[in-house]
Amino acid sequence: MLKLLWALIKMTFRNRQALFWTLAFPTMFIVIFGLFDFENMGSSHLAFIDKADNEISQQFKTGLEEIEFLTIDQVEGEEDAQNKLREGDLDFILIIPEEFVVPIPTALDPTKLPVEMTDGQPVNIKIFYDEGNVTTNQLVLSVFNQFIDGLNKEISQTPEYFAIEPEAFESKNIKYIDVIMPGILGMAIMMASIIGIASEITKYREQRLLKRLTATPLKVRNFLIAEVLSYLIVAAIQITLIILVARLLYDVQIFGSYLYIYLLSFLGTIIFLNLGFSVAGWAKSVNAAESMSNVIAMPMMFLSGVFFSPEMLPSWAYAVTKYLPLSPLIEALREIANNGAGLADVTSQLGIILIWVVVTFLIAWKSFRFDKNI
Amino acid sequence: MPVIEVKNLTKKFPLPGGGQLKAVDDISFFVKEGEVFGLLGPNGAGKTTTLEIVEGIQQATKGEIQVLGIDPQKNVNKIKEKIGVQLQASAYFDYLTLEEILKLFGSFYKKQMDPIKLLEIVDLTEKRKSLVRHLSGGQKQRFSICASLVNDPKIAFLDEPTTGLDPQARHNIWEFIQKINKEGKTVIITTHYMEEAQELCDRVGIMDNGKIRALDTPINLINQLQASGRIDFQVNRKISLEELGKIEGVVKVAQVNHLKYHMRVNKVTETFPKLISWAKNQGIEIVDEEVTHADLEDVFLELTGKKLKE
């Protein structure tokens, strides 16, 4: 079976078309999206309405001022700010509520630990933004999130976070390409797996190669395992190449563990291979297989947040799209890559992914037939 | 001892609109060790289905099969190790060289042959670094034959090995098949070319509509015909058909045109001298005489009332 695996990988690398779609195409995306330079695109204008006006809110403001592409504009009250936002003079309004108080940390008093909570509810910082400005929003919102995250952690003084946070704070300069890179990772493995396996298997069937294989003592199971392994290896090469290019060209950092990135991507690859096998079970010809795979992959590409956060969809749509197989994968990859999350931070996404692994396997099991007689 | 025994084999397929198609209809035959056995018949006669059931790729609806003493319905993997299969119009991996494909296929078997030696058999050693799609039609077929020999099988199943090839390439393939057979392998082929069956096969089963209509050596099949030979000739003056028909061994006579005649005879070797002496006695001069043996085409025509070739 090792020989078969090796042969399959060799074939992938000799098939220039497949190679283009699996390796060159996603790399191209990275190169192109990395060229979007937000400093040249002008900065985002922000109104900072500070109702709390205390040390911690000031610290928050200073922090925001340090971000290159954010300019804090002066406004006269909330209403003025909202008018400006409507007219496009402002991109964001941040309203810090009065309850944004920091109790004096009483270091060893555990009852005081969730300090940002009043009445057990988190204090909401309101953000108004222009929905039309999708890409900047994604970026700025993620910066805000990190900020709040950092504050939360700092306030709650969780010891293990304390050590790493200052460093991360300094180096974390999230660019658009940083947000996009995990999305492209997800897209790349999805495209390569679904379209790859569906058209490959249908082609083998059309050419009667599958039947030829059944005439040998090779077990169907071993053939399928070799196929899956070869795709996992190609996925690993894809991931490495994409990260490498992003890193070398645009200095994209991975804040979390590389191991988790690979692990999640492999789970994703298995989901998409299952879908590919299902398509191969249904499709009668290579053309049909290719268009069916596109019908499955394309909506996910646009709805699962490859290029922007799907949270920007209307909430009813997001409620649906966040359960698409690609969505939790990209969300989790983004959390790990951009925010240094561990697996414990992405359990809900991981849960959806694992459910999909099982569900798609069952679908594939039902619909996939190695060979059809007549 | 027969290497293959098939008894009362039937295969039915469900038809899309309901009902069933009897692809193979209660056939029995055996194949002797070391022979070239052929199934001859038109497309859709059930040859491929029969072959694939014997190979263990398809399941029989009914019937008993033994291949090398093993039942392919029960112990298919044991059989797959010992037989070589070439499928009708099946392709190989696009991005592997001939040598790599042979190595890969060899790795599926316990016993395997050296790829170079395999390529030698079909005269393709020079192409060992080429991809299948860079081969000509004849070379592809040759490769497909040698690929069926990777496990040094006792029996080679070749399904329409020369379909779609020009006569030159076809003769070429026949040579290779004879070579393989001489090395001691039993060969089973299906074909719809009667020349192929006649040239290659020790015994031929003539199949039509899922049934084997006749099974024997090509010579016996032809000799069993009432009229096993044809004589075509021209004469210098008109002769009576009735008179011609009276010659011993003549089955049928026809006037093709003004002075051209056609006769069907039992045995040309016996009847032809009689025709000559009859003509001498009558003072008739025979020119442009052409004596031909009947062939499997005629056998097929007599058995089924149909022509093999459209």
Image (cartoon, coloured by chain):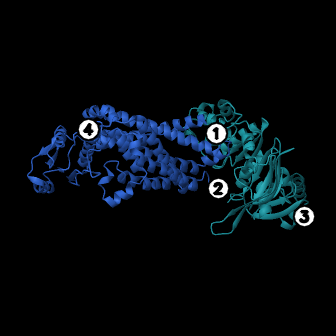
Q: Position of residue A324 (x, y in %)?
A: 42, 54
Name the element at disc 1: helix
As measured in the structure, the alpha-carbon distance from the residue carrying label 2 to the one carrying label 4 is 75 Å
Badge 3 vs badge 4, beta-carbon distance below 8 Å = no
SS of the residue under disc 2: loop
Q: Position of residue A151 (x, y in %)?
A: 25, 41
Density class for disc 2 (Cα within 10 Å; few <14, some 14-19, many ≥20) is few
| Residue assigned mark 3 | B246
Amino acid beneath label 2: Asn
Question: On residue A106, which mark appears?
Answer: 4
**In the displayed structure image, the side of residue A324 where residue A11 appears, left or right:** right
Q: Which chain letter matches label 4?
A: A
Discs 1 and 3 lie in a common subunit: yes
Q: Are marks 1 and 4 on the same chain?
A: no
Query: Closer to us: mark 2 or mark 3?
Result: 2
Tell me which numbered mark, 1 or 3, is placed earlier along the sequence. Answer: 1
Q: Which mark is residue A373?
A: 2
Q: Please rate how many residues cluster around mark 4, counting C-alpha atoms within 10 Å: few if below 14, some from 14 to 19, many from 20.
A: few
Q: Quadrant of residue A320?
A: bottom left
The mark closer to the camera, 3 or 4, is 4
Q: Amino acid at mark 3?
A: Lys
Give the residue type that dot 1 points to. Phe
Chain of the residue under the numbered disc 1 shown in the image: B
Residue A198 in view (yes/no): no
| B99, above or below B261, in the image | above
